[in-house]
Image: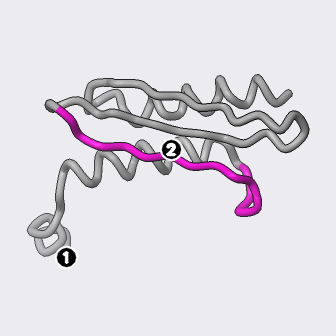
Amino acid sequence: TISLLSAIDNEDVRTCVEAERSFIRTLGMGCHTPVGSFASIEDDKVVFRSFVFHEKTGKIYREKIITKREKAKDDAHDIAEKLLLLFS
């Protein structure tokens, strides 16, 4: 099964999806909270963009980073934690 899946695996897509999911999972917000993340590969770096709408203040918080592939998932997690601090 692993060998079959590895034949269709796309490292760029996997890297981006893991970063996006890490961000959303860390926020732990439900599906009624306006939140988004988008990662892409540009010049062999991961460009990660995210936003969260804070319903109490009416503000939209946006973040954008450019990071190494191997750090994308952890950096996305760190951005989410930073945003959570703003909400507490």
Tell me if residue 34 comes above or below residue 54 in the rendering: below
Q: Secondary structure at mark 1?
A: loop
* Amino acid identity at mark 2: Ser
Residue at horizontal 77%, vertical 34%? Answer: 59
Range drawn in magenta: 29-42
**Residue toward you, 86 or 57:** 57
Tell me if residue 26 comes above or below residue 5 in the rendering: above
Residue at horizontal 14%, vertical 64%? Answer: 6
- The residue under label 2 is 22
Q: How is the image coloured?
A: one colour
Sequence-wise, which precedes: disc 1 or disc 2?
1
Q: Residues within 10 Å of mark 2 (few under 14, many from 20)?
A: many
**Residue toward you, 67 or 9:** 67
Outermost residue toward the right?
A: 56
Quadrant position of the C terminus in the picture: top right
Quadrant position of the N terminus in the picture: bottom left
Residue 57 in the magenta stretch? The answer is no
Tell me if residue 63 comes above or below residue 4 in the rendering: above
Residue 72 relative to residue 87: left or right:
left
Which is closer to the viewer, label 1 or label 2?
A: 2
* Amino acid identity at mark 1: Thr
Q: Secondary structure at mark 2?
A: helix
- The residue under label 1 is 1
Residue 36 relative to residue 10: left or right:
right
Q: Position of residue 86 (x, y in %)?
A: 77, 24
